[in-house]
Amino acid sequence: MKNRKALILLLSANAVSHFAQGISMLAIPWYFAKHLDASSTFASIYSIATFVTLFWGLYAGTLIDRFPRKNIFIGLCAISAIVLLSISSIGFINGAIPMFGVAFVFCFTLFNFNIHYPTLYAFGQEITEKENYSKTNSLLEVMGQSTNVFSGAIAILLIEGIDIELFGYLIQIQPWQIHEIFLMDGITYLIAMSLIYFINYVPSVKNQVSKEPVLLRLKEGVNYLKKRPLLFYFGNASFTVFIFVLISTHLLWPIYVEKHLGELGNVFAITKMNYAAGALFSGFFISIIFRKSNIVFSIIILMILALISIFILSISQSVPVLFGLAIGLGIANAGIRIQRITYLFNHIPNHIIGRVNSVFQSINILLRSIFIGIFSLSFFSEGSNITWALVLGGIVISISTFPLLWNYKELRDLDRKN
């Protein structure tokens, strides 16, 4: 791999920023659920923010194709550092951050995700030879989920605090305030920006920069998929598990733990950590496990694994079962992401990947905002009613497997021809 050093710096920068970002995105939902008793309010905020990202996501994809990916990353880190450090300073000055300030950080991070991850994968594709796409995607997943495991472990300490007896001495770690967590998050963005600044690389594929208007560039993505309906079916159907896992991580699991199980924040953090451990397993082994199978077959199997895990969670009221199935969901979701992105990379040229991803992201965001809006109803925050949200998610995932099964032979043959 000729851009090995550039890839290492990219992975390192992503891991650094993702570490504190992961803690913040664990702390905020739990802060609303436990400390503010405002799960329904948080769900409404999440739904509105997700819907707004639909329009931002359309524009973000065109930026990825229009400007150097390195410059986009540097700009993102700089803006993120300013936002997090500014909000954090409010907490240090006033002793606390108002609810709208905490909500703003969550919404901003959602907006960040919509350009960060498409840019990350497009940048990875740009500096990687085609024969190494699967390896690079696995590395991105491994580094991201390794960071998630670590951030989940640290989140347990920061959200709830802990007392440890070591060699006869009692060590007390006090819970961090939300503004202290935001301060750490802001600092890591500055470190990530410094790492990205030193990335030098020779593009493995030439990025054909276009300066056409945003709507025209989005239309190009739509037209590209219109001519390739199999890719449209594949790209959307294989995105469904990601939709519900993302909703679960930020919205359903905190309510599930607090209302359905009656447990504390450490259970929520361990659940997220176990999920990340499963995803880490996929990063290392999913390509090996399915090396003799085609990508479409592997995605169908992993979607069935996710489906089974979600349905069992909906009828269970056990912490160990939650921990175990979180690992299964991590394996399924990360494995699907790795295989899905590799399949799309193999069939979509780098110069249009951002525009095509904008179409997939827009549909993804629209569906997410609809489901989050449904789950924001106070009904789901009462007692064990959150389990009905899991049932609904399982039904939608089962329905989404049909386009893959119906077009299985064509999708498999398309991959063989590539």
Image: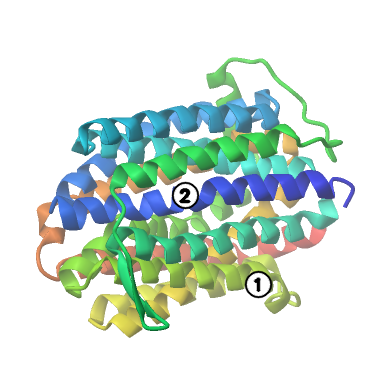
Residue lying at the far right in this picture: please name it: 2
Relative to 358, is 254 above or below? Answer: below
Q: Amino acid at mark 2?
A: Ala
Look at mark 1 in the image and give the residue it sits on.
Answer: 286
Q: Are marks 1 and 2 in contact (CB under 8 Å)?
A: no
**Residue shown at 23%/68% (left/top)?**
256
Q: Judge depth for marks 1 and 2 and give the one in front.
A: 2
Secondary structure at numbered mark 2: helix
Residue sticking out furthest to the front: 168
The quadrant in which residue 164 appears is bottom left
Q: Judge left or right: residue 289 versus residue 59.
A: right
x then y, percent, for residue 212: 64, 15
Against 395, residue 52 (above or below) is above
Q: Which residue is mark 2?
A: 20
Circle 2 Cα neighbour tier, 10 Å, few/some/many (<14 / 14–19 / ≥20): many
Q: What percent of the width, then of the height, locates residue 359?
A: 52, 38
Mark 1 → mark 2, Cα distance in angstroms? 27 Å
Residue 357 appears in view: no
